[in-house]
Image (cartoon, rainbow, N blue to C red):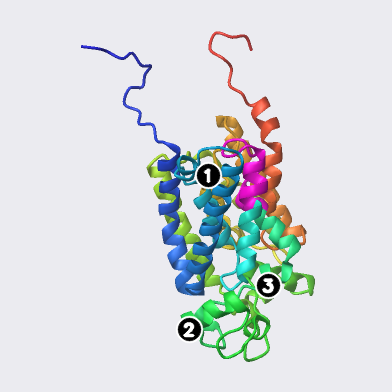
Amino acid sequence: MAFINASSPHQRTRRSTSQVMLWVILCLIPGVLIQSYFFGLSNLLQIALASLVALLAEATILKVRKRPVIKTLKDGSALLTGILIAIAIPPLAPWWIAVIGTLFAIVFVKQLYGGLGQNIFNPAMAAYVLLLVSFPVQMTAWLPMLSLQPFELSLLDQVSTVLTGYTLDGYSMAQLSVSIDGLTMATPLDTVKNSLKAGFTTTEIFDMASFKASSSQAILWVNMGFLLGGLILLSKRIILWMIPVSFLVGISVFSFIAFAYQPDLNGSPVFHLVSGGTMLGAFFILTDPVSASTTVKGRLLYGILIAFFVVLIRNVGGYPDAIAFAVLLGNMCVPLIDYYTQPKVYGGRA
C-alpha cells in the first residue's frame, strides 16, 4: 500500500480555476434575473453577445499564440469577463458596444499581458472605462425600468433597438429616453449629481419627479440580487471576506463623513450602498484573484482604498458611478500594497 504525505490541513478542498469561475457565474444569476425583470430581456441578449465574442476572441488569440485553445476556454475566465461587461452596459446599448468592449478586455487587457494570471488590470472594468470615455452617449443611455417607460417595449422591440437603434415602430433611443412629460431619464446617481450641480439639495432631489423616474427602487433590488449571490460565494469560500467587507464598510464610513459634513450636498451611506454597481463591485469585481491584493492586510487596505476612491469620485468627480475608475486605480496600487503587507516569514527576522 502506498501512502502520500501532504501538509495539513488535510480536510481542505482545492477548487480548480474552472470550478471557481463557474461558481461566480452561477452566483451572478440572481442579480442578472432581477436586472432583466426590471430593465428588459435585452440584458440577456447583451450577455449572450458579449459571451460569444469573448470566447471567439480568446480562441483566436490563443491560436495565434499557439496555446491550447479548448483547455484554456474551459477555465471560464473569458466567459465571466464577457458576462460582467454585458451587465455593466445599458441593456439597449447598440450591439457594437458589447463587441468593442469585450474585444478590448480579452485581447488587450488580458491576452497581450500573457493571459489569465498575468494581467494587472481587471479586464471588464478596463473595458467599461474605455467604453464610457469613448462612447459616453451610448454608455449613459439607461432607460427607466419597464413599468416607468412611456413606450411599451416587447422583446422584439428590444432586440431591434439593440441591433438597429430603433424599435419596430421606429422610435430611436433618444425618443425612448424622454418620458411623456418631457423628463430625460437617468440613473439615480446621474440624477443626483446633475441636480446638485444645478443648485438643488439632496432633500429636494429625492422629492423630484426626475428622481422618482430614475428607477432607484429597481436598482436597489438589483443590488440585493448581487448581494445574495455574493453571500453565497462567501459561504462557499469561493471568495474571502476581507475585500467585500472592507469595501462596504469603507463606503459606509467615507460617505457618512461627507454626509455628516454637508447633508444637503452628499448622499447618505444607504444611498451609496444600494445605488450603481456597489454590490456587483464588492463581491464580483474587486475580488478578482488576479488583479486584487493577495495578502490579508493588503486585501483590507485594497477594499478601503477603492471605497475611498468611489465616494470621492461620486461626490466630487465628473462621473456618477465610480466603481470602474476606482478599481483600476486600486489595481495600480496592488504591487505597492502587496510589497508592504507581506507577512513575516516564520523563523525570519522582522
- Checking the image for residue 117, the label placed there is none
Residue numbers of the magenta segment: 105-126
Q: What residue type is labelled 1?
A: Val
Classify residue 145 as left or right of residue 231.
right
Answer yes or no: is residue 265 visible.
yes
How many residues crowd around disc 2 within 10 Å: few (fewer than 14), some, or many (20 or more)? some
Mark 2 or mark 3, whichever is nearer to me = 2
The residue labelled by disc 1 is: 245
x, y percentage for residue 100? 65, 60
Q: Which residue is drawn at 51% across and 87% down?
A: 152
- Which quadrant of the structure image shows residue 151? bottom right
User: Residue 181's quadrant in the figure?
Assistant: bottom right
Inspect the image, locate mark 3, and give the three-letter code of the amino acid beneath it.
Answer: Thr
The kind of secondary structure element at disc 2 is: loop
Q: Which mark is in front, 2 or 1?
A: 2
Write down the residue under mark 2. Answer: 154
- Tell me the tag on residue 191: 3
